[in-house]
Amino acid sequence: MEWSAEQVGRAYLIRLQGEFDEEAADRFRAHVDALLEQGGLRDLIVVMREVTFIDSSGLGALLGRYRRLQAQGGRVLIVAPPRHVRAILELSGVPKLIPILRSERQALAAGVGGSP
Amino acid sequence: MSGANFVTIEAKAVIGNVAVIRYAVAAVASQLPFTLPELEEIKVAVSEAVTNAVVHAYPEEPGVVRVRAEVDGEELTVVVTDHGVGIPDIARARRNGWSSDPERLGMGFYFMEEFMDSVEVSSTPGAGTTVTLRRRPEQVAPPAAQPSATVS
């Protein structure tokens, strides 16, 4: 899995590309956690439009970041997962905790990344 | 391609090999009339079984994971074998939401069960684990094309 990312206010918007399996989950976890430890990051917007595969390792990494950010008063949003990826997200129950939105614009309009 | 076939992969139990194995199994599975969504589900189930072997079976040095993917004309059978530490309590390991590691979801076996027709697990502590996954395509294969009697 590869990604590109940008900081939008206090949100970190990360656009994932490829397969979100255990190998990717390890790198994603390390990357986001390093940013969290630096501070200045409150919310996480995960754009999944170009994610081609996810398994329980990828889901675990998402849920783990959700737990960390939520404990600090932040939010996590998922944007635009493809249909078969969304089906697995729903089977796991993740959307009960992490909302799924259609577009980056919608995620930013949800008040994510703005001042508290 | 039709009829029986199998492919066996013996791989070092490292995380980078999980993708290699799930591609190979999906390629074997595609010899049966699985739909693309079905193949995606099979890839998830295989990924879960092989990830378990890589992450849990060998806490010290990575050992070997062996995967046999077989199609017999009607059914896909995937057998994932490791010679690692084994699962002390299979019933607990298979319970949805249970994981030996708090950073994990504990949904590996749940996904295998959800996406395959059957999941069998046998494990001997200290000797290793074998997970057998089976699935038949939802749609029946179209009958093989009959050789045409006439050529128009």
Image: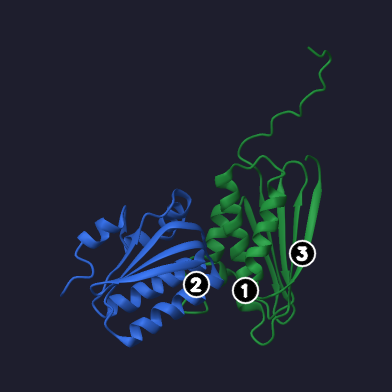
Residue type at mark 2?
Answer: Ala
Residue B101 position in % (x across, y down): 50, 79
Q: Residue at x 34, y 72 (%)?
A: A66
Q: Which mark is residue B9?
A: 3
Asked if labels 1 and 2 share a chain, the reply is: no
- Calculate the distance from the C-alpha at mark 1 to the C-alpha at mark 2: 11 Å
Residue at the disc numbered 1: B15
Residue at the left extreme of this rendering: A116
| Colour chain A is painted in | blue
Residue A37 against residue B138 in the figure, above or below: below
Q: Residues within 10 Å of mark 3 (few under 14, many from 20)?
A: some
Task: Name the secondary structure under disc 1.
Answer: loop
Q: Are marks 3 and 2 in contact (CB under 8 Å)?
A: no
Residue type at mark 1?
Answer: Ile
Residue B129 position in % (x across, y down): 70, 72
Residue B34 against residue B122 in the figure, above or below: above
| Colour chain B is painted in | green
Task: Name the secondary structure under disc 3.
Answer: strand
Residue at the disc numbered 2: A25
On the question of residue A43 being in view, the answer is yes
